[in-house]
Amino acid sequence: MLHYEPVWDQRKGYVIDQVVRHGRNVSEIAKEFGVSAPRMTAVLQGWGLSARELKRMRHAGWATPTNLRKLVQEDGFRPSQIAELYKVSDDLVNSFLKEFDIDWHDPMTRFMAKTKPGENGCILWTANNYKGYGRFTVNGEDVWAHRWIYEQKHGPIPKGMTIDHLCVNPPCVNDEHMEVVTQSENTSRMHKRLIDAGVRYKTHCKYGHEYTYDNTYYYEKDGRKLRQCRICIKDRWNKSYIPSRNRGEDGRVTSCKNGHPYTDDNKLINKYGIKVCKACRGNYKKFRKFM
């Protein structure tokens, strides 16, 4: 350490003010007084001020563990956003985060920063969502927020299963308000809740067919969610495209419109539950090659 001169005590207030309030570095102040940077550093050490102490003093207004933890964990700020907020460099913010042991990369920390408490014990998602259900990005992949938090607390959700919100609140991400059920069970519960709530909700189509999970076809039109009875879809298709000569005595369709019989080897069932002739399908594919 270089020799410390007591005469510097007269300039202590000015030097600290320049460093803390005006953000000047040691080399600039040393040049102003006509001394070298190492000598200025020795003076600061004589006052018991290290470079780290000066940095803390300079940013004492915001660079505190409480404030940074709130910005990262509660408000969901990233280092670049904090740097832009306080007009400082990203490296400076990262150095403080590292010093205070605040990990902003932690997915759970980012997740909880996007929630807020709601009524009846719900934890509401406040960030990006699709039709009320939260969306969350993990390792560059978009996932459903409620499914992600459930898997973090209870393990993977079995394939083919879905999450039922017992609180009937889609933005809720409280895992205690969720239950893993089948899609059919989830749909049945939704129907029952609507009926119990007194909502005018049709349980059968106009021809008396019940809207069960297997008998309901959901689709969207003009931004609205609609449904149709699968039995009625099949009946309309049969009446429109299948002439009477291709029906048996019981009215059931026994052959396609081109006369090919619907044997076990010559039929497929599409997603609407409608029989498709394999022979006609094969001829259509061959015809397409020459178009």
Image (tube, rainbow, N blue to C red):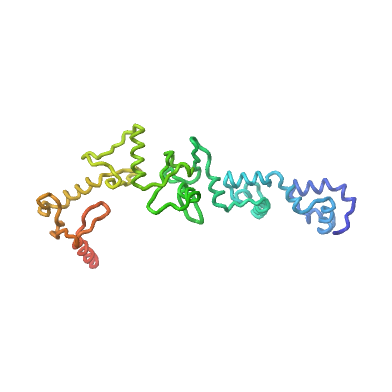
Residue drawn at x 14%, y 51% is 252
Q: Residue 185, position in %: x, y?
A: 35, 44
Q: Residue 41, position in %: x, y?
A: 81, 56
Residue drawn at x 25%, y 44% is 229
Residue drawn at x 78%, y 53% is 50
Residue drawn at x 47%, y 48% is 150
* Side of 131 relative to 230 (left or right): right
* Side of 139 relative to 184 (left or right): right
* Side of 92 relative to 272 (left or right): right
Q: Is residue 49 above or below residue 278?
A: above
Quarter the N terminus occupies: bottom right
The answer to which image quadrant residue 75 occupies is: top right
Quarter the C terminus occupies: bottom left
Q: Residue 184, position in %: x, y?
A: 33, 46
Decide which of 185, 256 is in the foreground and name it: 185
Q: Is residue 45 above or below residue 289?
A: above
Q: Single out the residue that lies furthest toward the right.
A: 6
Q: Residue 113, position in %: x, y?
A: 55, 45
